Image: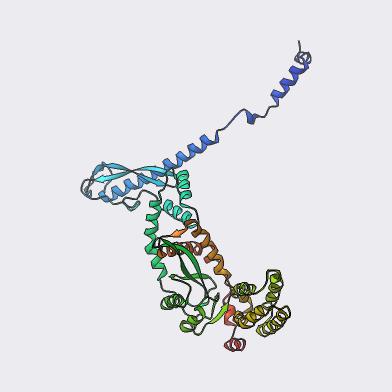
Amino acid sequence: MPDDMITSEMPTSAATETAARSTKPLGEVIQIDHSVVKKHLDEVVRSTVEETLNAMLDAEADLLCKAKRYEHSPDRVDTRAGHYERQLHTKAGEVTLKMPKLRKLPFETAIIERYRRRETGVEEAMLEMYYAGVSMRRVEDITEALWGTKVSPSTVSDLNQKIAGQIEQWRHAPIEGEFAYVFLDGIWLKRSWGGEVKNVSVLVAIGVNQDGFREVLGVAEGTKEDKASWQRFLRYLKDRGLKGVKLVIGDRCLGLVESLGEFFPEAAYQRCVVHFYRNAWSYVPSTKVRLVAAMLKAIHASEDRAAARQKVTQVVAKLRELKLGAAADFIQGNAEETFSYYAFPSEHQRSIRTNNPLERIMREIRRRTRVVGAFPDGNSAMLLVCARLRHIAGKNWGTKRYMDMSRLAHVSDEQTETESA
């Protein structure tokens, strides 16, 4: 009987089932266990790293012996005496190293430091997580998931102590070049002191160098943000070679302006406009804050210092009409400190009229230090702030050009004197 006749005589349900089987996707027939594949690939990578490191160790041993293993050579100075095993945690996982032993000479490898149990990259990754704001408990969990072993808090503490010397060297390194714009601010942190939790301030300075890049100029502990603390901090910057300062931007901290005149008398002082607004709002009822904010922003939207002064007169008169005498007195007495930026290139003015470049960094530091809580002492607080600042400066913040400093050269001394009058 022909095949087409056999098919036609098949029941409808059977024909449908046969057609479904014939059109079933092939992808459902072959199944791949991705977890097994990943585990296999991880093992291949780990084995490759292990073989490569052991081959390098053998090559170092041959170099010391001046002959390969089992090679008869008149230049040979030593022979092998077996090996011992040690574990090393790498990014690819834990590997077993076969450390060669020699009969006469001590085997000192340049590949791996003596007693080191972790690859340098692993340690750097742990520190980067810690300084980026990851809690200690989370660092332990992450390292266990990535490298198969949990890192204890004491390990991270030892690493911190190891880089403490590097940070101190960085803090006291000479300041090279000139910095026309310097931003100053302080941050309050908690520390344990005699069984009580006290406040400790850490003072920070950043500057814009001659090429227009921002740099962290200095970090120091201050007992509190007072005149004595600012004097010590400014002397610390001056002694390290800070020069060429034309404008210092900061909040109206106690004793800051007076100390600037002592150490950098040639520099103008720019009171942060944003902080000035906040101070003014403290003299205004909450229902009038929005109105007063619009008035203040109109002052600093003026095209030059003369227009800004004229606008202040109008705003003060308006505030007195609104029966806000305290706010009017404050603005009339303090607005002039916020106009120093008008003496500098218009292309720079938006960046130098506030302390925002440093404020953003301070927010990052507060986020990181909030995880720690109270520090055991002021030095540990400063250590973490320095480490975080170095981490930030090493990223896009410090490698991205902030402004074109060639514009500053076009501002003549006569223009500066005219604007400052």
Image coordinates for residue 49, horizontal then vertical, percent: 41, 44
The image shows residue 248, relative to residue 48, as above or below, that is below
The residue lying at 31 percent from left, 51 percent from top is: 114
Image coordinates for residue 258, horizontal then vertical, percent: 50, 82
Residue in the foreground of this view, choosing between 8 and 267: 267
Residue 79 location, quadrant? top left
The residue lying at 42 percent from left, 45 percent from top is: 150
Colouring used for the render: rainbow
Q: Tally the numbered discs.
A: 0
Image coordinates for residue 94, horizontal then vertical, percent: 40, 43
The residue lying at 53 percent from left, 59 percent from top is: 367
Task: Point out the image quarter for the C terminus.
Answer: bottom right
The image shows residue 14, relative to residue 277, as above or below, that is above
Is 258 placed left or right of 330 in the picture? left
Residue in the foreground of this view, choosing between 86 and 416: 416
Image coordinates for residue 234, horizontal then vertical, percent: 45, 77
Residue in the foreground of this view, choosing between 162 and 261: 261
Judged from this view, the residue extending furthest toward the top is: 1
Residue in the foreground of this view, choosing between 153 and 420: 153
Task: Point out the image quarter for the N terminus.
Answer: top right
The image shows residue 387, relative to residue 337, as above or below, that is above
